[in-house]
Amino acid sequence: MLITDDLLLYYKRCRRRAFLDVYGDRIQQDPEQDFLLKLRQDSLAYRQAILDVAPHQSPNYPRRDWAAGAKATLELMQQGVDQISQGILLMQTAPGVTLLSRPDLLVKQPGLSNFGDWIYVPTLIKLGKRSKPEYQIVAAFAAHLLAAVQGVLPSSAQLILRRQDAYSVSLARWEPLMQEVLSECIDTLLQRQEPDIFISRQKCSLCHWYSTCHAIAKAKQHISLLPGVTPSRYRDLQALGLTTVESLAQSPINLLEPAVGSEVAVDLVQQAQSIVQNRAILRQRSGAETQTLELFTHPDVLTTASVELYFDIEAEPELKLDYLLGVLVIDHRTHTETFHPLIAEHPKDEALIWQQFLDLVLFYPEAPIFHFSEYEVETVKRLAKLYQTPQPLVKHILSRLVDIHWEVMNTATLPVESYSLKHLARWIGFEWRDSGVTGSQCVCLYNHWLETGDRTPLDAIVRYNEDDCRATYYLKNWLKNFMQESVQNSTKSYAKISE
Ligand code: SF4
């Protein structure tokens, strides 16, 4: 069995991922998403750009002949080559287990080793911005194998992160941690113990086993599918014997309170009840009288203004560009719905679309501007600062923004796996015209447009953005009706009690 840097990195992220990468049926893997393909290409290009300006030699060996690669790398180290790229470090451990590391660079430094008065230090090049634990584990793994070859463990390994930020990994700290992770990983794989599923939206959405794992989790009604169940809360719930959604839905709040606190306990139980009963439930607040719920909701959500604007943005993070400001104008006076896709066909047009946006929202100076998530607020502030928009005007626009995500989160518990716009709007019956398109895919589509000038991807992005605006409109109307019904019901109950 070959334990590589990548396998260890994935094991650190998710034990099950490493297990399935070794023993899973590859036919069940999801096809690579465009977004991930782009990420992989960007990562390779970044590594190459750094290597291009670092004079180095690479070991020469037949493809995938790791023993020959390790021998060729050793020869370069013995010669005292200053920088060796993609060297092979190999080690046999337990019977049938081989460790293989391929650090991006081995950099010669002063010190004493088997070779003479020099040692090598491993350097990894990563496109990530932060020195994530899994990067440090993999750097320590390279240093561990290197120590067996040169007879000495360097005091640190290096990470070159995005924008060439250098980060030093302390091996006194990370090498022992790496040994623990490595030994667990080898045991899991040798004993063929399939690790349990835990669906974490952030981690799993980037994994090629997502459909397989999600289908199993769904069939088991796995508790990790509940919003709010983090890995540590999952452990707490398991310790209390709450392993199914039903058991959580029936659990008394005070059973959970010592482990997770009263607010989270109420949220988790209510979330489970919403799923078991397949209905939206008014979110409970400790100490709040139900008939004063209007106070917790933005007044613009509970009414219908004569004109309403629905706003959604598409961005290209790598270019630090907000290239589409989409605004749906709902004019209840004229019964018209008009979508304005303010799109920067070239990155330099961002200032132009910002001005068009200002003109449009000022044309309806009283209209509330509904959006979904904090991103729109942050972007208005960013663009205003960048293009020196007068402060009173910025304040006026910010005062009109109403975040429907925040409103839903604070007023209703819905039987969904996530409080994303897609999950919420789909639960209430809204469908996107192009079901396969996602926000991250739009980034790839926009880059395709920039590279080829083919308008087809641009049209797909505009359709997607318009549907996001329409989904927000749909959700706002649903929330308004839900709140009104809830307040009416609670008033009736209050009247009955008072009689
Ligand atoms: S989908 Fe999630 S649980 Fe399944 S292997 Fe991937 S990361 Fe692990």
Image (cartoon, grey):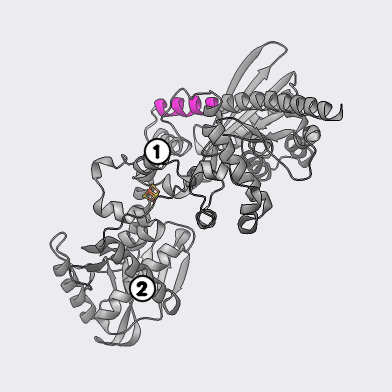
User: Observer-nearest residue: 62 or 253?
Assistant: 253
Q: Secondary structure at mark 1?
A: helix
Q: Residue at x 22, y 72 (%)?
A: 94
x, y (%) of residue 67?
15, 69
Q: Secondary structure at mark 2?
A: helix
Q: Is residue 354 above or below residue 129?
A: above
Q: Residue at x 62, y 55 (%)?
A: 260
Residue at mark 2: 179
What separation in Å lies between label 2 and label 1 (alpha carbons)?
Answer: 36 Å
Does 419 sit left or right of 363 as displayed?
left
Disc 1 C-beta below 8 A from ligand 1: no
Q: Is residue 7 above or below residue 340?
A: below
User: Observer-nearest residue: 172 or 333?
Assistant: 172
Does 366 sit left or right of 324 as displayed?
right
Q: Main secondary structure of the magenta part?
A: helix
The magenta segment: 455-467
Q: Where the C terminus falls, by quadrant?
A: top right
Q: Residue at x 37, y 53 (%)?
A: 43
User: Observer-nearest residue: 454 or 184?
Assistant: 184
Name the amino acid, label 2.
Gln
Q: Which mark is residue 219?
A: 1
x, y (%) of residue 338?
61, 18
The quadrant in which residue 401 appears is: top right
Q: Residue at x 51, y 42 (%)?
A: 245
- Determine crowd level at label 1: few under 14, some 14-19, many 20+ residues with C-alpha closer than 10 A: few
Does 154 sit left or right of 87 as displayed?
right
User: Observer-nearest residue: 278 or 38?
Assistant: 278
Does 152 sit left or right of 472 as displayed?
left
